[in-house]
Amino acid sequence: MDTRISWDQYFIAQAAILSTRSTCTRLHVGAIIVRDHRIIASGYNGSVAGTPHCTEVGDLIVDGHCVRAVHAEQNALMQAAQMGISVDGAEVYVTDVPCVQCTKLLLQAGIRNINFMRNYHNDPFAEELLRQKHVSLKQVPFSSQTAHQIDLNQFIAHE
């Protein structure tokens, strides 16, 4: 009997761990782009590289959104672009449902499946775009059983 966590649980856990690098004070988000069960790019939300972080200087809120932040999905797509990696036909695992802007970018880049852990301000237009493009939006819950299976306690250094 295979007791390993599923691929979906594995990649959503990776996104959750990645989100701990976020410098956003409002919501920590991580995104992993995957092809053939291999991570090809990743990102988390935070300010533009080399500029002050929200954790240092505060949020810059305009119309209810922090304009200082680059979204996790955007950072993952940019990482792939900088490395010359096509994401066409890949899938993304993200801690939270992508906003409408990120949904449009993911669709334009050729992402075929969007997997998420938490619902967060789902946008009706984004959902309509996904239907039109036949791209799946699937919730991958992270249960206490999954957390128990991962068991990071075994890796804690004993001093």
Image (tube, rainbow, N blue to C red):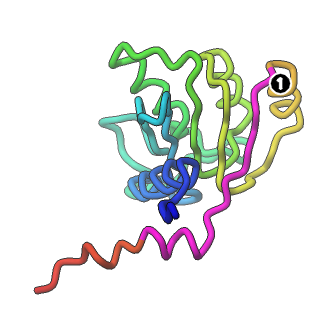
How far across and how far down the image is residue 145, in percent? 58, 74
Q: Is residue 143 magenta?
A: yes
**Which residues are drawn in magenta?**
134-150
User: In the image as oriented, which residue stretches furthest toward the bottom?
Assistant: 159
Q: Residues within 10 Å of mark 1 (few under 14, many from 20)?
A: some
53 is higher (above) or lower (below) than 98:
below
Q: Is residue 89 magenta?
A: no
**Which residue is found at the position 70% from the left and 23% from the top?**
104
Please name the residue that numbered disc 1 is placed on: 129
How far across and how far down the image is residue 16, in percent? 50, 56
- Near-viewer residue (128 or 137): 137
**Which residue is found at the position 56% from the left and 25% from the top?**
90
- Near-viewer residue (104 or 137): 137
**Quick check: can you spot residue 126?**
yes
For badge 1, the amino acid type reads Leu
How far across and how far down the image is residue 48, in percent? 41, 35
**Which residue is found at the position 42% from the left and 52% from the top?**
18
